[in-house]
Image (spheres, grey):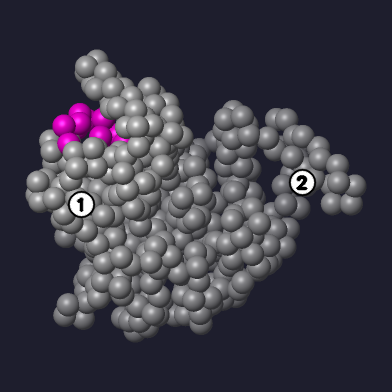
Amino acid sequence: MSQSTVNILRRADDQEVVATLRDGIKPEDLAAIEREWGPYRAKIKQELVRLGIDKRTWPQSLHWDWSKKGPELKLLESSGFIIEFEGATQGIMLTKTASYVSRLEGGKPLVYIDYLESAPWNWNVQELQRKGEFRGVGSVLFYVAVLQSEQEGFRGRVGLHALPQAESFYAGKECRMTKLGLDANKQNLPYYELSRKEAQEHLSDGGEK
Amino acid sequence: MATKRTMTFNLTDPEMTALEELASKKDLSKTAVLRQALRLYQMVDLRLERGEKLVFEDKGEKKAELVVL
Amino acid sequence: MTENMKNKAIPNSKWLRRMADAEDLCTSVAVGGLAQDLGMFQSAVAEVPKVFGRLIEYARRERGLSVEALANAANVELAEIVAIETEHDTVPQPRTVYQLAQVLKLPAPRLTELAGLAQPRKVLSEAAVRFAARSEPMSKLSDDEKEAFEEFVKVLVEASDGG
């Protein structure tokens, strides 16, 4: 496991804080994270139920359970990244390097983002008038995926299937991804890719200034 | 990053040529190609072990060919 | 991989703010297949038909209690009882399950399994299927329903005797 630092934003005072980025996480780490996040998920769900909020508008990752993802980490192609601040896990991402190749750019390898989630206390849940504690966690994880791709020699290429609630973010001009249609092999979720060219711009935009 | 260990191995001419072609095609270094091959082999092996099937589907003929590794 | 990143302060402030603003415009930026459909993310309750709510409703009616009366007796939020009885995938608070078990005189550990808070035993899954097949939501418990309910409770109690 190795670590370095990344910046995220604290909403309360709009300050940038220096968080820890760790890779090489193990299945036990995932179980621990879910124990950390579980109660917060449950609380949000209870509130949503209590207020009778339509399930279709609930955060789409509400039911997730990272402890079940352990087995996936055993493969060489899998990488797990977490962002930690003040002893709490702020976000997780699992990527794969061999399961998918670029459909946009002639079968070239890419980093596929299998799962990405920010901690429940970081979610903006409109129906509960709730704003997340830390901002930009998802963006930083996305950036880390692009960096991983660059370091693997994949030139920054990244692919992912976007959930409906997240699509506008990945489709937007900040992420610069290209939509390649709905994927029947993945519940018809839209598949997005970051091309080499856009990846380089993304890295340069987000990098040290 | 995990500590690295060194391995040297010899390739025949055809093997080296194939490696170079793949590297060029995939826009990767030769080392990266071999690393990808290892990951892919491990992943496929695990999924086959789990009972999944790997299939090549012929676009024109609608014939599916089962891959056994 | 992060070795190479050690000396860089990433990402830069301007980029971070711009991206965070974009994130704020969405409900979520989570990535991952639709949770309920993926084998990877399965809740315990997937093993057992969702009979928890119906069981609570039956037990309540068998005692001639209104939803409000049950909420008071169990010292639990009225809204939660309503949700439990009417919403199929409500996951109740552990405390609520315990309280209901006390008031309705049902074995708490089995109730916890039915509620989806713990891995259910096989005998429970089978009994739950039978109960689900025989029971219908109605305002008065018919003789049939009463019988179905009693049989199910018998299994719960017997399963508890084993430990």
Figure quadrant of residue C114: top left
Q: Chain of mark 1?
A: C
Q: Nearer the viewer, residue A181 or B24?
A: A181
Q: Residue furthest right?
A: B61
Give the overall secondary structure of the magenta segment: helix
Measured from the top left, where is residue A206 in percent x and y?
41, 76
Magenta residue span? C104-114
Q: Nearer the viewer, residue A203 or A53?
A: A53
* Side of C154 where A105 appears, left or right: right
Measured from the top left, where is residue A80 in percent x and y?
40, 50
- Residue C111 included in the magenta stretch of the image: yes
Label of residue A208 in the image: none
- Residue A101 included in the magenta stretch of the image: no
Q: Chain of mark 2?
A: B
Q: Residue furthest top?
A: C162
- In the displayed structure, would residue C91 be above or below residue B64? below
Measured from the top left, where is residue A10 in percent x and y?
21, 74
Q: Are marks 2 and 1 in contact (CB under 8 Å)?
A: no
Between the C-alphas of marks 2 and 1, the distance is 73 Å
Residue occupying the point 39% across, 80% down: C25
Residue occupying the point 38% across, 49% down: C88
Residue type, label 1: Val
Label of residue C67 in the image: 1
Secondary structure at badge 1 equals helix
Residue occupying the point 81% across, 37% down: B65
Residue B31 visible to an observer of this rendering: no
Residue type, label 2: Ala
Give the mark toward the camera: 2 or 1. Answer: 1
The residue carrying pointer 1 sits among few (fewer than 14), some (14 to 19) or many (20 or more) residues within 10 Å by Cα, namely some
Q: Quadrant of the C terminus of chain B?
A: top right
Measured from the top left, where is residue C163 in percent x and y?
22, 18
The residue that mark 2 highlights is B18
